[in-house]
Amino acid sequence: MSPAFRAMDVEPRAKGVLLEPFVHQVGGHSCVLRFNETTLCKPLVPREHQFYETLPAEMRKFTPQYKGVVSVRFEEDEDRNLCLIAYPLKG
């Protein structure tokens, strides 16, 4: 089984990142979120994860940069609104 599907332990004292909707999505995944200016988050699909983990180096310049897996949790902000927060996994 892929490491991404084992217990998703978060780094102790890790600072979370607020995920925001990615408004420029045109198709494909139904839930794409913006992690930062250059990184998107989307639901983990086992086959896609395996593809990026085993992609030959010669092909990487032709594909989107794969940055790994995060754990995403619902948390309340100070106004009690639900937010999606991403945390790095233990490496």
Image: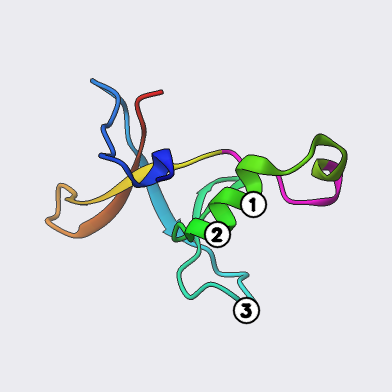
Which mark, by number, is residue 47? Answer: 2
**Residue shown at the point (26%, 32%) measured from the top left:** 9
Name the image colouring: rainbow
The image shows residue 30, relative to residue 89, as above or below, that is: below
**Which residue corresponds to mark 1?**
51
Question: In the picture provided, is 29 more to the left or to the right than 9?
Answer: right
**Which residue corresponds to mark 3?**
27
The image shows residue 10, relative to residue 23, as above or below, that is: above
First along the sequence among labels 1 and 3: 3
**Mark 2 crowdedness (10 Å alpha carbons): few <14, some 14-19, many ≥20:** few
Q: CA distance from mark 3 to mark 2?
A: 19 Å
For mark 2, give the secondary structure.
Answer: helix
- x, y (%) of residue 38? 64, 44
In the rendered image, is residue 38 in sight?
no
Residues in magenta? Answer: 61-67
Q: CA distance from mark 2 to mark 1?
A: 6 Å
- Do callouts 3 and 2 mark residues in contact (Cβ within 8 Å)? no
Question: In the picture provided, is 71 more to the left or to the right than 30?
Answer: left
Question: Which amino acid type is shown beneath numbered disc 3?
Answer: Gly
In the rendered image, is residue 45 in sight?
yes
Q: CA distance from mark 1 to mark 3?
A: 20 Å
For mark 3, give the secondary structure.
Answer: loop
Q: Quadrant of the C terminus?
A: top left
- x, y (%) of residue 4? 40, 43
Question: Which amino acid type is shown beneath numbered disc 1?
Answer: Phe
Q: Quadrant of the N terminus?
A: top left
